[in-house]
Image: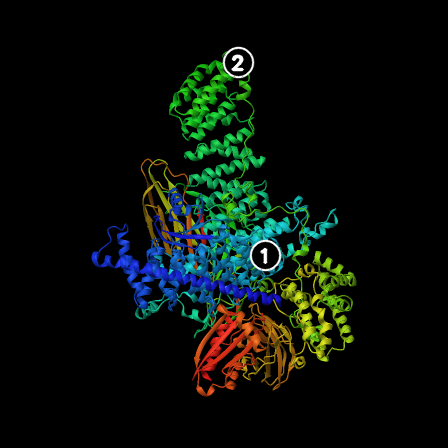
Amino acid sequence: MINSLFLINPSGEIFLEKHWKSVVSRSVCDYFLEAKEKALEPEDVPPVIHTPHHYLISIYRDKLFFLSVIQTEVPPLFVIEFLHRVAEMIQDYFGECSETVVKDHMVMVYELLEEMLDNGFPLATESNVLKEMIRPPTILRSVVNTLTGTSNVGDTLLTGQLSTIPWRRAGVRYTNNEAYFDVVEEIDAILDQSGRSSTDLSTGTTVQRSWKSDPEVKGQASGVCVCVCVVCKLCYDWLTGTTVFAEIQGVVEACVKLSGMPDLTLSFMNPRLLDDVSFHPCVRYKLWESERVLSFIPPDGNFTLMTYHVNAQNLVAIPVYVKQSISFFECGSDGRLDVTVGPKQTMGKTVEGVMVTVHLPKTILSINLTATQGSYTYDNGTKLLVWDIGKLNPQKLPNLRGSLSLQAGAPKPEENPSLNIDLKIQQLAISGLKVNRLDMFGEKYKPFKGVKYITKAGKFQVRT
Amino acid sequence: MNGHRGFSVLRSEAAGAVRTALVSAENLQLTLKTELSQEEQHLTPHTHTNGGPDETHTKGYCTEVNEDLKEMLESNKESLKLEAMKRVVGLIAKGKNASELFPAVVKNVASKNIELKKLVYVYLVRYAEEQQDLALLSISTFQRALKDPNQLIRASALRVLSSIRVPIIVPIMMLAIKEAASDMSPYVRKTSAHAIQKLYSLDQDQKELLIEVIEKLLKDKSTLVAGSVVMAFEEVCPDRIDLIHKNYRKLCNLLVDVEEWGQVVIISMLTRYARTQFTSPWKEDGVFDEHNERAFYESDEEKTRDETEAKPYMMDPDHRLLLRNTKPLLQSRNTAVVMSVAQLYWHLAPKNEVSIVTKSLVRLLRSHREVQYIVLQNIATMSIQRKGMFEPYMKSFYVRSTDATHIKSLKLEILTSLANEANISTILREFQTYVKSQDKQFAAGTIQAIGRCATNISEVTDTCLNGLVLLLSNRDETVVAESVVVIRKLLQIQPTQHSDIIKHMAKLFDNITVPMARASILWLMGEYCERVPKIAPDVLRKMAKSFTSEEDIVKLQTVNLAAKLYLTNSKQTKLLTQYILNLGKYDQNYDIRDRTRFIRQLIVPNDKNGALSKYAHRILLAPKPAPVLESAYKDRDRYQLGTLSHTINTKASGYLELSDWPAVAPDQSVRNVEVIEPVKEWAPSLGKTVKSKPAKSSDDKFYSDSGEEEEKGSGSSSSEDGSSSSSSEESGSDAESHVQKNSSQTSEESDKSSSQSEKSSSESDSEKKERKTKTPLQKKTVKPTAKDCDSDENGNVAKEANSSSAEESSSDSESDSDTHTDSDSGTEHKKKTKSKAKPKVEVKSTKDVSLLDLVTPAPVTQHKSSVLSPSLLGDLEGLSLSNVSSTIQLSGPAFVPEKSHDLLHRMTGKGLSAQYQFPRQPCLYQPTMVSVQISLTNTTDHPLEQIHIGDRSPTGLNIHCFNTIECLEPEASVTVFMGIDFNDSTQAANFQLCTKEDHFSVSIQPAIGELLLPITMTELDFRKEQGKLLGMNESSATITMAAENMTSQPISRPVATVANLGMVPSSQDNVHRFAGKTANSGAVVLVTVELRGESTALITINTEKSVMGSMLLRDLKLALAQA
């Protein structure tokens, strides 16, 4: 199975290696580094590389490459999934997964890796089990450790107790028993600027109307722009783009700090909304099948209870619209950019944390923009424009406009860059999913329970 | 028994081998020590004289650091050592060489400090291979740790021992693995499964022995072990498919509860297995699965179809079982598990069922980029064969500008495969967006995709072609070039009416610089020169000018063009051609020189080869077949989906081929697991109770019926065969209905089976009436249990539970019966003979039939193994049961502690209170169980109804529940008995105690001493047994105790309190002996307490269960020290 693991930073330095079988020389990484050189972006490095004697499977995450060396046939997803677990484990233990953190806790990371695999086959990947064996560092403990010279290795080891439930350690005790659930939904969407009528919204009718551009917007290539509006039952609102694709993905994150062996049952008001689900291993699948309730003995601490996909038949409410025009003048080396963001279907909630990210064309030399709200940053190296808007005010729509200058002699960019939108709506699950109740069995105390809803933009893209 | 004895002999031999190994290791240590000291002498002057880095040493700095570390490691301070080890491990992690420190590090292997120990382990594993001799020093430490009572320590010792890749210790590893494979902790057994692979890679000669261990571990029922042992199986003996047969159903049923990594391995193994064992489910449905006209069959499964088919296809129930049990795993959070289920369905499921995996695969696309990459690759392969599967999800494959390059191209690939007449317009519109992308490579890929769509769907060929021609005026070169190439291919398919496009391209020729595109245009000119008679010579003229500065590929096409034009239009191009051929003749590239020479000989007529030039026209201007634009994923499905080989599209080493379906299914019965009577070794004496066991499931019933006849008729040896045949005759109709049930899971089935069970229970009633041994109490017990769970499942569950040990027990009971007749008292004889045939009767059930009903892989329980009342306990008192040998007999408990433990406090139990104690009686329900007495008291003011045992947590422990207490009046209390098979471990049994309204989780944790059953034997036998259990099987300790306690009575008292042991008469005053055997495995446990001098005593425990031994020793030490 997994023979060795190398951690490599973006500049190509191998800063940690771990072998579970015989030692593989680190020169094997050269094949990978070669591929990395070829790739434009670190993301473009192929995840599976075939070398004469080994197979290299790598992931790129948190600005680190996790490169594993394989010698025989193994499902690649098996390795990839494991590597992500390693990254998650580092994150879980040290708060973040970065080169500095790994270098600071080299020995502990190494020990963790030792525990996670035996002979290349996963042995303990549940964070609860790992934490039993190797204690995560805390400030208090590190102080105590330096004073007393004791260690992070779990002394509970001596009891030899292995919980009968692999994901939960035995003998959990809390003074405050609490269980919190966050329902986080993400909208994945591709919105289209041009007047194409390719749309998901089959129930909507398509109306064409002309719209006069804001007189303030000067220098715009076309004074009048024609757009297609979708009028649907949910809204009677003109839109600046059509939805090419939209869907809602959700996840229920849990933070459960309960003593003993609680047996929880979580039920939804409208479970029919959920089309496709995947569960943490603790969830009893049979009960979900028959009664559509989540019944489980929770792991201790933070974990992802379930992820779901909302039924595709449901309309997806798009919370914001984006009016934008990026134009370049045919003759001069000059262009204009004008972007306005406004709220659309927000279900009466405030849209927060709005952020617009644009990958500007490579030929842009410099930009000169003004934002009516928020601030923008521009990295001339990567040509990345980030406009951090913050809270969306329906009365005064935020606008970013200004001029772009191209490199002299460079041709006018053919295609306008697409915008990636980030946003957040508190206290709302955009699909309308609601948790009905949470019951606890198996323990006597009364836990404190809480549910929070958040809607975010997932892969939310506006094509221009 | 012989077997048992043989085993102990083996064991003692093994122990001997270990000792020799140890001795040799010690010798080594001695020799090494001298070397070490030499080395030290060598080193000390350095530090004194030099003080600085050793010049002669290549790694001067390194040495200095290492010297530093070495000093720290050799210091007495724990903290210094720890610090040093941390730095050493840090060095290893960074990939620096720290092998020089080996001698210093290895000394700390026996450290008490766990963290230090762990770090030393880490170091050892890394460097032992390089420093083999020194590594041997550590072996004895691990061997000691292998016997530690703490399962984690045992496991980690085995892990490290097996990770030390030193060939000399192979025999020691082998022993340790064998030992650990029968450890009571599943965690240790799991580690031993891992160790198998390590040993195998170290020494392939051990294969046969390792296969034996694998075989044993495959039978393990723990979900913890399953994944690891299958992994070992895959690595050591993937071809020994026969080992799987008997475990197939168990694996299928356990699958959901196995940890996720194990699931992946098991599923992929089962996929291979199924392809060799079942017939293809695709035979006839391949015709219509893509078309929905017969879709309504899907709901009825494939059986309805059979009416029309000449030779109906019947899916093997085991095949169905696998499909059904893997389906829930599609909901796993682990992407690898989802993928492996998807590939299983792809390779095994009837075609109309494959599409259930679609949704889950599409879900994985939300996951990490690397996951997307692999999943998309697999979808690409799937979508070529079965568009319908992914078409509804087409939009999920739309490309985002933020996708990585390889993801983009895969999505394009899939979109292209999904294109059909209906959706092509949507897809083309989407493609238009992509063509404009800033990522020009991607745009080029899109153009190729458009080309493929155009060839596949003839309706849009013209549209695509026009679109591509428009792209020719694109500013970007790659886009134009790619368009040219694709247009060339398209034109070749439809060459007739496109001279306009060719002309257009000729015009563009000057602006295009990409060699491949230029070459393509030149080729087009040449190929269709007759359609553009005026333009082609002009293009050739231009090429003649720029020939020398062109790329090779363009030059070659120029030569081709010249030759073709020469043949068709020699008047205008003769000179040009000759000029170009002359240029080509002296080109640097030999390919071009070759081509030129060849063309010249072919087209320019001269004397020598006039024969060939006659055919020049035909050779050069032959109609060429149009290129087929097809996916790169076309043939990928020759590799099993989801594998590495599939991803890299070549056979990875260690790839196991998926065989084709067999034409005729191999014998199905190999998977049948024989069902045995739960009452194993001492069954004979319990004959009465067994016989009166009410049958709750139908097949159970009629088998036991036939058993009665069998008993009278034939001898025990032939009873097995006879019983099964007689039973099938007897209940022919029943069997038929089973087969039907098997094939069609209709609603009828449940009716039928319930009626069957009714019938059977009535039968059993009548049967009981015939029997004189029946007690009124038993009759009562029938009801609640039958109510407890539905009859179908009942039967299955029990079978599952018993299945694994089927064979051995049947043979056991035979041999038992022999010995019993010799030894047993006359009074028991009658009962015994009556029941003797019993255990053999149950076998050969129509297991495959009933399996169909097993929807849930229910926790393995002894639910219906036998229902008998605890009142029978009385009958059993004083029975002496022989089991180990004629001289070793089970005896009554020497002492029954009164102490009872709280099971459920009345406050937590809402008024119901429960206490449990160990009555130290042999358990009636099953000999391997420990009986537990539970007193339930109702402290409320209202009656409590239906007190029973509910869910058991998945510990894998068998629990025999007490019968439901219908009603417990206020202030009343009742005592019930239950049996728990603790598997010789002190792991707590968790279960729920339920009333009508509530359920409470409770747990029973046994002391180690309660897992034993007392036996009596003579002193001679004791010594004989003790002689077999020396070495590793012996643990001892010296304790101090008060002087007044040094007599026999106070010693036997605490010993008996701690453990359920029998006294063995002793000839010496100061030596007290006790004997017992473990409830589950029947391993002998011998305790010797030898009083020495004033106040010390030596406790010695001999048992092959070394872990139990050391735990028992700890308890005894405690008890005796107090005394």
Q: In which quarter of the image is the C terminus of chain A?
A: top left
Q: What element carries label 2?
A: helix
Mark 1 — residue? Answer: B326
Nearer to me, B256 or A150: A150
Rendered image: mark on residue A182: none
Q: What element carries label 1?
A: helix
Q: What residue type is labelled 2?
A: Gly
- Respond whether the residues carrying marks 2 and 1 are from the same subunit: yes
- Spot the residue most to the bottom: B1044
Which corner quadrant of the image does residue B761 belong to? bottom right
Distance between mark 2 and mark 1 Cα atoms: 72 Å
How crowded pointer 1 is (Cα within 10 Å; few <14, some 14-19, many 20+) is rated as many
Mark 2 — residue? Answer: B610
Q: What residue type is labelled 1?
A: Thr
Residue B164 image position (x, y, % from top left)? 43, 57
Side of A38 where B678 appears, left or right: right
Question: Is B864 placed above or below B737 here?
Answer: below
Pointer 1 indicates a residue of which chain? B
Nearer the N terminus, badge 2 or badge 1? 1
How crowded pointer 2 is (Cα within 10 Å; few <14, some 14-19, many 20+) is rated as some
Nearer to me, A449 or B979: B979
Nearer to me, B885 or B973: B885
Residue A442 image position (x, y, % from top left)? 53, 73
Asked if the residues shown at circle 2 and circle 1 are in contact, with their CB atoms under 8 angstroms apart, the answer is no
